[in-house]
Image (cartoon, rainbow, N blue to C red):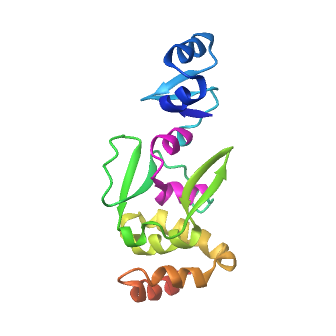
Amino acid sequence: MLYRFRDLIDKYGNGYQIKKKMASGQIIKRNDGLYADSDNISFTDVIVKKYPKAVITGLTAYYCYNLYDINPPVIHVASQRDTSKISNPTIVQHFVAKSIFKLGIINLKINNSEIKIYDKEKLLIELIRNKDKYSESQFSNIIDNYKVIKDTLDFHKINDYLSYYPNGKQLSIELEKYV
């Protein structure tokens, strides 16, 4: 499990006790104020703990849902437009308007980690909306995989989400072309 320093203070009482735990190997300092009680901590765990308001999106989310075949070299996260920029070369941050940021956020358990991620319906809308930001092979790979799971998608939810987008009607037309 990952901890922030203040979590360890709550758990162990003071810095001296934390240093004792670190010296005995029970607590391991990871990076930038994060600590772990084991070595089996994934990079995604670190991102989730370090940036709790960020939501997994883009190629990373498609990969998590098995809608994209290649594990991206960076983690794509969404943040509200009014949040601070994340200065980390392993993260691509996408700023999202407040009106649509919270749509479709779910908690998903992957490899003993729980992450905040957009649901498949919101990601389909975002794929169509941002299709020019993907290569032709990326876009067609993801769309082909969406076609396979088309029957499992909640189209009422998609239509509800589209009502929050200023160009929702146009996106709906585009979506019908592809899926």
Percent of width and height locating residue 75: 46, 48
Q: Residue at x 41, y 84 (%)?
A: 168
Q: Residue 158 versus residue 131: which sits nearer the camera?
A: 158
User: Which quarter of the rendered picture does the N terminus lie within?
Assistant: top right
Q: In this view, does 89 lie above or below 133?
A: above
Q: Residue 110 versus residue 98: which sits nearer the camera?
A: 98
User: Which quarter of the rendered picture does the C terminus lie within?
Assistant: bottom right
- Residue 46 included in the magenta stretch of the image: yes
Q: Is residue 83 left or right of residue 41?
A: left
Q: In this view, does 74 lie above or below 124?
A: above
Percent of width and height locating residue 98: 37, 68
Q: In this view, does 21 lie above or below 61?
A: above
What segment carries the magenta color?
Answer: 45-64
Please count the marks in the image: 0
Judged from this view, the residue extending furthest toward the front is 13
Q: Residue at x 66, y 49 (%)?
A: 110
Q: In which quarter of the image is residue 82?
A: bottom left
